[in-house]
Amino acid sequence: MVVENNVALQPYNSFGIVARAQRLVRVRQEADLIELMTSANWPVLTREAPPFVLGGGSNLVITGDVKPLVIKMEIRGRRLIEETDKGWLVEAGAGESWHETVRWTLEQGWPGLENLALIPGCVGASPVQNIGAYGVELQDRFSELDAIDLQTGQAFTLNAAQCGFGYRDSVFKHTPAGDKGFGLAGRAAITRVRFWLPKPWKPVLGYADLERKIAETGIAHPDAQQIFDWICAIRSAKLPDPAVIGNAGSFFKNPTVSEDQCADIIARDPKVVHYPMADGSIKLAAGWLIDACGWKGRGVGNAGVYEKQALVLVNRGGATGGEVMTLAKAIQTSVYERFGILLEPEPVVV
Ligand code: EPU
């Protein structure tokens, strides 16, 4: 295994932040990681800090040069494992592009992932975040994943329950000593993910943006490819393309409040965008809260708030991770002062 030194990370993070990895290895198959972990070099490489697994870097803020060993996950490969009269079981390597994988499943005639089109990043990161958009979350289409334990070198498989999925959350975002009391953050290198795409396919069209497309086009019964095209158009219209303007998608989670708290906010701000949840709590649109505090288009240094969607922080060119985090903290403070709500960031900060 080749350990590369002093590797530029700008091409590997969607924010486009300039930083370097002191040491980086590229894992193209499971055996590469096992070989590395059993080499005499491993204790030396991980002596000061546990390794850091890098996927597509689309949910990441890098605040300086990365000292831990960076394991860049580049495992490729996509295949149909099984088709039954109940659905398709499809597997993809962690290093495959998420969007290209969605496109490929549709080309093969296996619908189900279309609402998750155009989400940046790699397949391996999709369970970490439990990515979601337009009424579908990864957990709705997830079967299992394979991973390698970075402490023991053992390969293991987890089902959905074992992944502890929540809203933009999973066991991979929590440390064992963290608030949940369990976690695999920093411990699991996800190598492959399997998706279950059920038959018969049912379109998920409940979101206002999609209802608008139905009204505009007069297509009341879109097929999966049509929904894919609509989602791509909707996202492109309001979210910046990371290849053009660096960003990490939504920077904060949409916060959940109680009915009383929401009533209190509505009394002061009747226009607050809110959605009742099945458990009786209410989800607020963080983008609206940030927008209401006047942040759209403002910034700190070269880090800014996107003009078309206040939930997205962007790199206007040459932003540092420090500038992004200073901006994020300033936004948190003003939303807290006005609404009494502490917004929780989505991306991983290193
Ligand atoms: N809004 C404003 N001003 C803004 C931004 C939003 O008033 O600057 C209002 C919108 O008008 C809308 C509401 O807030 O009424 C919600 O906005 P939007 O539909 O754009 O969705 P979101 O809640 O901001 C979430 C996800 C997105 C996902 C979309 C669609 C989170 C944190 N974000 O955004 O996911 O694509 O819904 O399902 O849950 C991501 O996680 O990176 C991401 C892009």
Image (spheres, grey):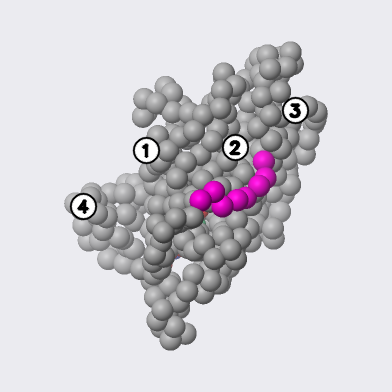
The residues colored magenta run 75-82
Q: Earlier in the sequence, mark 2 or mark 4?
A: 2
The answer for how far apart the CA atoms under marks 2 and 4 are is 37 Å
On screen, 47 above or below 230?
A: above
Question: Tag on residue 99?
Answer: none
Q: Is residue 64 above or below residue 235?
A: above
Nearer to us in this view, 240 or 58:
58
Residue type, label 4: Gly
| Front of the two marks 2 and 4 | 2
Residue at 51% over, 74% down: 226
Question: Which circle marks residue 161 in the picture?
Answer: 1
Asked whether mark 4 and ligand 1 are closer than 8 Å, the reply comes as no
Mark 4 residue crowding within 10 angstroms, few (<14) / some (14–19) / many (20+) = few
Q: Is mark 3 within 8 Å of ligand 1?
A: no
Residue located beneath label 4 in the image:
280
Q: Which amino acid does label 1 sit on?
A: Ala
Quadrant of the rendered image holding ligand 1: bottom left
Return the residue at label 3: 23
Magenta residue check for 78:
yes
Earlier in the chain: of badge 4 and badge 3, it is: 3
